[in-house]
Amino acid sequence: MNILNKLTSTSMLTLCLALLFFTPSQVLAQTTAVTQLDALVQQWLALEQQQHQLQQDWQLRKQSLQQGISLLQAEQKQLQQVLERNSKQHDAVDEKRAALLAQQQQLELQQQQGGRQISALLQQVRVMQPQLPPPLQHIWQQELASLPDNADASVQLQRSLFLLTKLAEFQQRLSLDEMTLETADGKPVRVKQLYLGASQAWFSSADGSYSGLGYPGSTGWSWQFDSSVDGSEVLQAIAILEKR
């Protein structure tokens, strides 16, 4: 507005001087020039105001854009942090999964090895069966016959341990039994047997006329009539055990 006032005063002064010293035609020409000058000044002022308004608008938009950019940068930073945390968590999950998988594979390997060991143990039990004393062999035969062919390792192990426990118990005590033996001439004789553990036995008929020894072999137990074995002593020992 200061420039407008200044220009307006100048144009008025110019107009007054023209009226005093110039002819009417000169005054008219001068007035037209002043009018054109005022029009240019008004256009310039209008452009200046538009430029000023544009600058103000741009400053406002610039601030808004800067705020938006700052918000976007903050959100991007937060998102990056979230992604980094998720990445670390994902890596941790992958590591844990890999560790569990390795542990599972190790357990499966141990289980397979254990299964083979249990199968080998059960096979040893089967091989031992014919060499056992007949009373114990009868128990083993029943237990092994009732074991399914497709029994899992835990069942096989349980059955094997049960039979070995029976063998250990039999080995640590004196046991009695009865059976019918056949003499050398084919005569059947009913005898009582006294087992000392699972490795030796004596037998005698009820009247002591037949006596002998029993012992394990590779194909089973063998019974041998032996007159050097005192049948009465065998019967006496059996009688003592029967009274317990």
Image: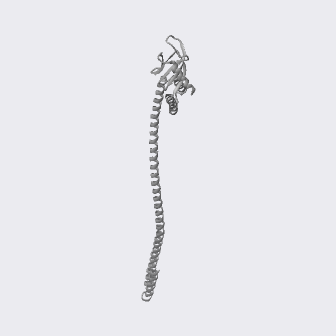
Compare residues 108 and 185 and report the one nearer the observer.
185
Q: Is residue 239 left or right of residue 216?
A: right
Which residue is at 47% across, 61% downward? 74
Q: Considering depth in this image, is 104 or 84 the residue closer to the camera? A: 104
Q: Is residue 78 visible?
A: yes
- Going by the image, does 143 lie left or right of 92? right
User: Quadrant of the rendered structure where residue 17 is?
Assistant: bottom left
Residue 181 x/y as whole percent? 52, 16
**Foreground residue among 81 and 207:** 207
Q: Which residue, as the protein is rendered here, is positioned at the far top?
A: 185
Q: How many marks?
A: 0
Colouring method of the image? one colour
Q: At 57% from the left edge and 26% from the top edge, which residue is drawn? A: 243
Query: Measuring 45% from the left and 52% from the top, which residue is drawn there?
Result: 88
Q: Is residue 221 visible?
A: no
Foreground: 30 or 161? 161
Residue farthest along the bottom direction in this orientation: 20
Residue 116, x across and y down, in percent: 45, 32
Can you say whether 148 is above or below 204 in the image? below
Residue 5 percent coordinates (x, y): 46, 82
Displayed quadrant of residue 143: top right
6 to 125, vertically: above or below? below
The spot of residue 147 in percent (x, y) is 54, 28
Quadrant of the frame with the C terminus: top right
Query: Is the residue 29 above or below the residue 242 in the image?
Result: below
